[in-house]
Amino acid sequence: MSGAALTQPAPRLRLSVSQEWLLAGAIVVLFVVVGLINPRFVASRNLQTILLGNAYVAVAAIGMSMVIVSGNIDISVGSLIGVLATVSGSLAVAGVPSVLAWLLPIALGVVVMAAQGAVVAYLGLPSIVVTLGMLSILKGGLISVTNGVWISNLPDDYHLAQWSLFGVVPVPVLFMLVLTVAAAWWMRNTATGRGIYAVGGNAEAARLCGIGRQRTVLMVFAIHGMFVGLAAVLFATQLSVIQSTVPPNLELTIITASVVGGVSILGGTGTVIGSTLAAVLIAAIGSSLIFVNLSPFWLRAVQGVLILITVLADIYRRRRRRGAR
Amino acid sequence: MPPTEPPIAEQAPRAGDRMSAAAQQPVLALEGVTKSFPGVQALRGVSFDILPGEVHALLGENGAGKSTLIKIMSGVHHADGGTMRLDGQPIRLGSPLAARAAGIATIYQELLLFPELTVAENVFMGHAPRRRWGALDWPAIRERTRTLFAALDINDLDPAQVVGALSVGNRQRVEILRALSQDARILVMDEPTAALTEHDVARLFAIVRRLRARGVSIVYITHRLEEVFALADRVTVLRDGEHVATRPVAETDRADLIHMMVGRRIESLFPKTAVKIGPPVLELRGLSRPPLTRDVSLTVHAGEIVGLAGLVGSGRSELAQAIFGATPATGGSILVNGQAVRVRSVAEARRLGIAYVPEDRATQGLIRPMTVRENTSLAVLSDLARLGFIDRAAEARLAQETVAQFGVRTAGIEQVVGRLSGGNQQKIVLGKWLAAKPKILILDEPTRGIDVGAKAEIHRLMSELAGRGLAVLMISSELPEVLGMSDRVLVMRDGALAGAFPRAEAAQERVAAAMMGGA
Amino acid sequence: MSDRSAALRLPRLAAHELVLLVILIVALAVLAALSDRFFTLDNLLNQGMLMTEVGLMAMPMTFVIVTGGIDLSVGSALGMCAILLGYSWHNWGFPLPLAIGFALLAGAAGGFVNGWFITRLNVPPLIMTIATLALYRGLAEGISQAHSVRGYPDWFYGLGQGALFGVPSQLWLFFAAILVFGVILGFTTFGRALRAIGFNETGARFSGVPVDRIKLIIYTASGTMAGLAAWIFVSRVSTTRSDMGTGMELDVIAAVVLGGTSIFGGVGTVFGTVLGLLLIQLLKDGLALTGVKGDATIMVIGTVLIASILVTSFAERRRDAARASNPRSPRATTTEGRETP
């Protein structure tokens, strides 16, 4: 029995490392195949559209991944992005310097999420119920305050996408890349970051290691709030007109990115590199449907199947691991 | 010992020093510790000490107070009375974390690891070496993990392996490494070999000896006497929450220890009445469900109590759950009243008249947030219902009868079961299954965690039930219970039957020897 | 000690419902005072009609949540069933009654798929129904290509827009569902089994409760009710669109949780769910009538939801604290709820 542990390389390890490679591979295959069918798909303008239009999803998915790794979930994220985007736009139109119009929503995001995190961590209420209630409050609050009025005439220097690094990487995409790498590094290489995995994996064992569940959950929600604020700003600044709505089921798309990226809903495992790759993959699939003459209305079905495949693969993996013991 | 001893071992006391152990100051000393739980006095003035670099075995039957004692040492429970001294200084351990900080690490049977993380990370979670800006120093973590491997002569683990993929024995070694990485001076091990294979046991022994050589003190709790003689320097025996004796292992022997563990007036506790044995009711022929049920054949007759002895992990509960359909058998056959039957689910078992009172009351036996009424009727709900509608009056009547018949001390049938004492909870589980009017009653550790008075009551009930013609199969880790209650004793080891003794021949030593094997 | 706690226990079980009932009565009184159009039979029946779809789905959802599970896919299942109803009739040439049956069957199948994966492969309900939330909506969108179907024959509108004995037809169905589901949860072996599973699945299994079969049944029921709600919805609004029922799962869950069903399982009543539904719908309507904008009412509902579970949670904490200080209580002396040694 113990000999098996010696000769058999841990299957779980190799596969879990490869979750990110798998997604990267899937993206490459998708671009090659669809590109062969229709070269316009791989034209740089389309690539830019895919990345620019979805950078905010990937950024929000970073925070969501942390929340799910800690063993919680947040379904208020979509409506919070809507609220914060409106706040940001309103500030910009009201003549507030753009820098503040970018920063204040982020601060507000931290406050709102930290409040939810405190309720989840210290009052022990399930995160799904708390964030469900918050979803209603934010959604209803937004429309009733704005009356659904659109925000236009945004100042010129408000739009982040007008700048780019070396003229190639637009600022929102730069944000996505830098934040993903930074968050991945932080979660991988700091004691606090590892604490999130510890709490999500085995809260009791974490407590014995001096890592408190309550403190960690509160922190994770607060950080998630920062990413949601950033996502809202990235979302708002790519629009010429900010409506008080977000794409339908945005929270679902963000959760999907996390789950397909390899974050287990049971907590304790997954990386943000995976979730960002998954966000890009989902966006690319959505875009590719048009290029291969498939109706984009199938996108959501593809998303559903994608989650199912990921979950089944995970179950298969766990079974094999149990068999390896 | 290998020639390349780590330098730290130089300071460690040698075997010769251990002989003069009495002269040394204990690392940890408990004096007159008392602790009570609702309805149970778990510890009555127990004293216990651990010397530097010794393996101190802690022996006792289930319920003797071993678990409570180590939970006090590891900061989980707080003693009601008595003192605890670390290096001669009085200390108070407010939490498990405080105990760890004081250098006392505990390895429970239920390992506290992070299954998704690597070996190295599990070892250093919470106290990993860092570099600038709080960054974890991964090379150092891996290096120090390897150093720990070397110190314990472990060469078949990889620091980068994910812990969830490891065998139980390997995961246990990861926990030991973690304790060591925190410079634990006292390592408390709660039945560490219970779930291990023989090979893993041998490796664990080697590690324990190496730890001792490094000066680590080890409190070793076990049921297996041969382990005491193989490993320990001193042994302390607890019985019914009292300290019986502490002796150097060299000055004691097997018979002595068994006598100290079980030495009590057995007769009063075990009111076994002679019953006329009827025809066979339950027969197993080569029943299998690998790995823990292997080719088991046995017969239980009407009116007979068959005791099933064996160590924890010998496959007794697994056998019971295969008979009961909770984890259906994959091979062999089951006969009820001479008829071959198939048991694929608990519901089928119930229809066949098989009842199982499980070992784990809290998760398997009861729905603790539900009331006495709802629990007593759960297994027979369909009989109490017409067209699916529960007959509340009949249900209440059943609950009342159960409470009266078993003398359950409860405020009423609407009392939440989780608030009853252990003994009363067990009576509810029994009552629940007797309501199903079984022909075969399997009892799995029927008196675990129950105080002596309630124990005797449960035993009286068992006798009475056998008297009514039930076939009773009783699993127990308490030898006196097995010997006192059974008409026949069967012994399981490693998933197979390893011995059978009629009541007259079932002497404590013989059964114990069959349980432990090799002796 | 035990006498007192037993005496305290019964009213506690109903405490959440009692709080809701009081809130409901106060809300009714205030709203009736604020608007004379509110407390009229016409308005109340109309409101009942509007809440029927959510209400029907809230019935099996109560069961699902009582077992400690969740079904996020019901809104999407409604959309899928509505599209299958409309498309099988309009585009595939099914006779309309057959199309209705087909939609109901599709709902049942959708629920069965959830239940099968959850019981056979041990997929957590949350993740399974998130996947089918996307999948079923995707099927609705993909099949219909976002085209709507209208022009049903007149008889078809009888269910959604007609009335029987002066009461909207679908309300009869809703009443029947409340009765059936309420009786099942409150009085039958099935209902008892649901609670047992929610409290302690292993314990239920070891007592001979067919846990997997029961779960399969309730998830299938959840999908079937989504199909029924789809039929009523299409009939009420005279059209079939692929975005029907978007986000409705949250309304359903909010009503169930507001009604006192614990997301941890074991605790919950159909009566509570009905109170939750009523409170949400009447708040929406009453606030709208008194001039509060529609969307502010969603906000009020979110607040009421969080406030109600906070109050319940505080009440439980105080009770636990009282229990912890009681030396004879078993829970107080064990760590992590383990048995005392």
Image: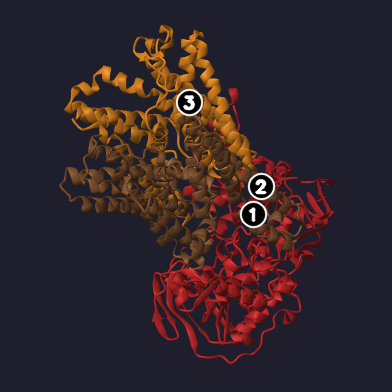
Chain colours: A orange, B red, C brown
Judge left or right: residue B370 versus residue C163: right
- Which chain is home to disc 1? C
Residue A81 rendering spot, x and y as whole percentages: 46, 26
**Looking at the image, residue A78 lies above or below residue C320:** above
The residue wearing badge 2 is C315
- Which chain is home to disc 3? A
What number is the disc on residue C189?
none
Taking the spot 48% from the left edge, 75% from the top edge, the residue there is: B383
Q: Secondary structure at mark 3?
A: helix
Q: Are marks 2 and 1 in contact (CB under 8 Å)?
A: yes
> Front-most of C143 and A237?
C143
**Residue type for callout 2:** Ala
Q: Secondary structure at mark 2?
A: helix
Same chain? Circles 3 and 2: no
Judge left or right: residue A167 versus residue B87: left
Residue B517 rendering spot, x and y as whole percentages: 57, 72
The residue wearing badge 1 is C12
The residue wearing badge 3 is A144
Dividing the picture into quadrants, the one containing residue B47 is: bottom right
Q: CA distance from mark 3 to mark 2?
A: 33 Å
Q: Secondary structure at mark 1?
A: helix
Taking the spot 58% from the left edge, 38% from the top edge, the residue there is: C30
> Front-most of A322 and B351?
B351
- Which chain is home to disc 2? C
Dividing the picture into quadrants, the one containing residue B493 is: bottom right
**Residue type for callout 3:** Ser
Q: Disc 2 vs disc 1: which is toward the camera?
A: 1
